[in-house]
Image (cartoon, rainbow, N blue to C red):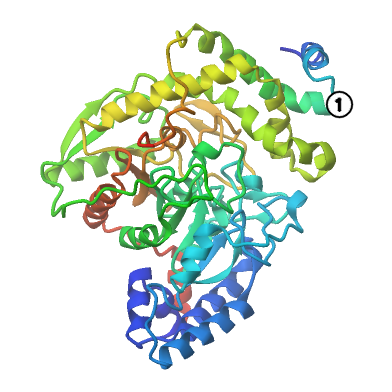
């Protein structure tokens, strides 16, 4: 992802009016998220329950 | 007893001495204040230091004792409280400039419990801004230093808590842990740090990191017995906390020796990509435990790689908490966290749901693995304390980020057990050739906190680590 793509993403989803400096600051973090997605989306998770149903500890 | 001797006592020992009338709370508190005044300015320990209030409470405690009244279990014992845990009438900043003037009207439940137990707060300790990082190089309240090497970080986010406890300022420190923020600084400062089973200690009055289901309030202490005492006083169901559970830790039969205990050693991830000395010290510790009769069992946790993927999508939760403050006070956030938080708004709902389901898979696998062993063991951190201000470290020839959030090197071994909700403890097991402490993390099944503490106490006994940093030994020698 580059700065232009991030700005397009923002325009579509959030319509923020950030400065270039703010977009540039966010870019490494958004890029890391985007790069993690192909592998995350490959995992078959349709039948798996959410962790928010069984809270941590598992005895609720 | 002189002040240095008083300060060096354990929590259990000072409690017993005050209860027996061998020490006054005023003397104990004055000794702690003397040490805080010696180090606070240079080490950036406190955000709000309250010596006068502490001394006033100590004198009241001594009057109560003199009147022959029944004394609560921590009567007159000074402790410290991390500055993201609410204290009524006393500002609680979360280490953030945006909350610099935030004064809660009520104490956190844990603070109420410890006050009822007789503990006295010395003040509110420094932390990584909003507990969102592992260095405690705080842009607003100062770069906290490591007592074992003053040019290095103490870790975080409970860095002020760890530095105070290491410098013997108070007898226990309250910290918080959402990805390792108790265990990381405890590990880097040669202390014991406990993250108990999620939900058995109330989070009411704890400023959220944004991920409530991974937040914990936990103690940093100088011994496992002290951590056990703190947990016994902090735990309990709290109907005001939606994450609180009525289930409490299961009772544990006495464990007399390591003989026959099964210690699981993960075959991947947790023992990969370690600093050479950290690995050597932790492997030597495991060998010592094996010699003492423990059975070492290799275990595989296959979903750990998936969990690290899902962490990115978790950014959305922190963004939701901070969004209104980011909108109105963006410049008040440190550069370290402002952009990371903003990035959370682009996480898609479907990916967030995937992340929670991956977490479920991980929780279930960890639970299965932990049912086959008594504890898991691994280095608490992959590296010893790095220098203040350094951004990267080289591990096995590869340059990696020290603390980038959502995927930092510092928290790689601690974060998974916040996600799993199971109890984990770090205890010091050695020092590098540079004199930097190294911690071993032990992990047990959910609600087996007492068993975990019992096993940790046996490991502690085997390792005989002296938690006193060299700077205090030098001071004593000069005195």
Q: Residue at x 37, y 33 (%)?
A: A58
Left or right relative to B348: residue B174 = left
Does residue B336 appear in this view?
yes
Q: Quadrant of the N terminus of chain B?
A: bottom left
Left or right relative to B143: residue B333 = right
B437 vs A55, nearest the viewer: A55
B123 vs B276, nearest the viewer: B123
Q: Quadrant of residue A24?
A: top right
Q: Residue at x 53, y 65 (%)?
A: B80
Above or below, comparing residue B350 to residue B29 in the picture:
above
Q: Chain for mark 1? A: A
Q: Residue at x 26, y 58 (%)?
A: B464
Number of dots carrying numbers: 1
Above or below, comparing residue B99 to residue A36 in the picture:
below
Q: Which residue is mark 1?
A: A18
Does residue B45 appear in this view?
no
């Amino acid at each position: 992802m580059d700065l232009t793509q991030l700005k397009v993403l923002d325009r579509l989803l959030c319509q923020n009016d950030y400065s270039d400096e703010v977009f540039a600051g966010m870019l490494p973090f958004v890029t890391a998220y985007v790069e993690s997605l192909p592998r995350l989306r490959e995992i078959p998770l349709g039948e798996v329950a959410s962790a928010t149903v069984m809270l941590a500890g598992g005895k609720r | 007893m002189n002040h240095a001797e008083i300060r060096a006592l354990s929590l259990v020992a000072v409690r017993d001495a005050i209860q027996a009338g061998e020490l006054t709370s005023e003397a104990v508190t004055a000794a702690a204040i003397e040490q805080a005044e010696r180090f606070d300015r240079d080490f950036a320990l406190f955000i709000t230091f309250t010596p006068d209030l502490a001394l006033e409470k100590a004198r009241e405690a001594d009057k109560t004792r003199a009147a022959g009244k029944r004394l609560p279990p921590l009567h007159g014992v000074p402790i410290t409280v991390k500055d993201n845990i609410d204290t009524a009438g006393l500002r609680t900043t979360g280490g953030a400039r945006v909350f610099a003037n935030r004064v809660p009207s009520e104490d956190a439940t844990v603070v109420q419990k410890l006050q009822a137990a007789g503990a006295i707060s010395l003040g509110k300790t420094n932390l990584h801004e909003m507990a969102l990082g592992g260095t405690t190089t705080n842009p607003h309240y100062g770069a906290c230093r490591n007592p074992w090497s003053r040019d290095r970080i103490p870790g975080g986010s409970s860095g002020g808590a760890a530095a105070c406890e290491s410098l013997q300022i108070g007898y226990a420190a309250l910290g918080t842990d959402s990805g390792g923020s108790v265990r990381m600084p405890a590990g880097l400062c040669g202390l014991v740090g406990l993250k108990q089973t999620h939900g058995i200690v109330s989070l009411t009055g704890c400023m959220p990191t944004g991920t409530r289901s991974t937040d914990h309030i936990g103690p940093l202490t100088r011994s496992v017995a002290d951590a056990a005492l703190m947990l016994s006083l902090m735990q309990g169901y709290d109907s005001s906390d939606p994450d609180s559970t009525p289930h409490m830790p299961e009772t544990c039969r006495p464990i007399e020796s390591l003989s026959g205990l099964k210690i699981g050693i993960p075959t991947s991830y947790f023992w990969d990509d370690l600093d050479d000395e950290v690995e050597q010290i932790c492997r030597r510790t495991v060998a010592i435990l094996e010699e003492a009769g423990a059975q070492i069992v290799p275990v595989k946790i296959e979903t750990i790689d998936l969990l690290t993927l899902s962490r990115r999508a978790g950014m959305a939760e922190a963004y939701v908490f901070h969004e209104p403050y980011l909108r109105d006070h963006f410049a008040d956030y440190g550069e370290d966290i402002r952009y990371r938080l903003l990035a959370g708004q682009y996480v898609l709902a479907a990916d967030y749901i995937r992340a929670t389901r991956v977490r479920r898979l991980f929780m279930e696998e960890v639970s299965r693995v932990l049912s086959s062993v008594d504890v898991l063991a691994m280095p608490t951190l992959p590296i010893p304390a790095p220098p203040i201000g350094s951004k990267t470290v080289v591990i096995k020839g590869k340059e990696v980020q020290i603390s980038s959030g959502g995927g930092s090197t510092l928290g790689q071994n601690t974060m998974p057990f916040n996600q799993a909700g199971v109890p984990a403890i770090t205890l010091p097991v050695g020092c590098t050739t540079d004199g930097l402490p190294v911690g071993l993390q032990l992990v047990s099944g959910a609600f087996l906190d007492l068993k975990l503490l019992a096993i940790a106490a046996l490991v502690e006994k085997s390792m005989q680590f002296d938690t006193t940093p060299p700077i205090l030994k030098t001071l004593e020698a000069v005195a």
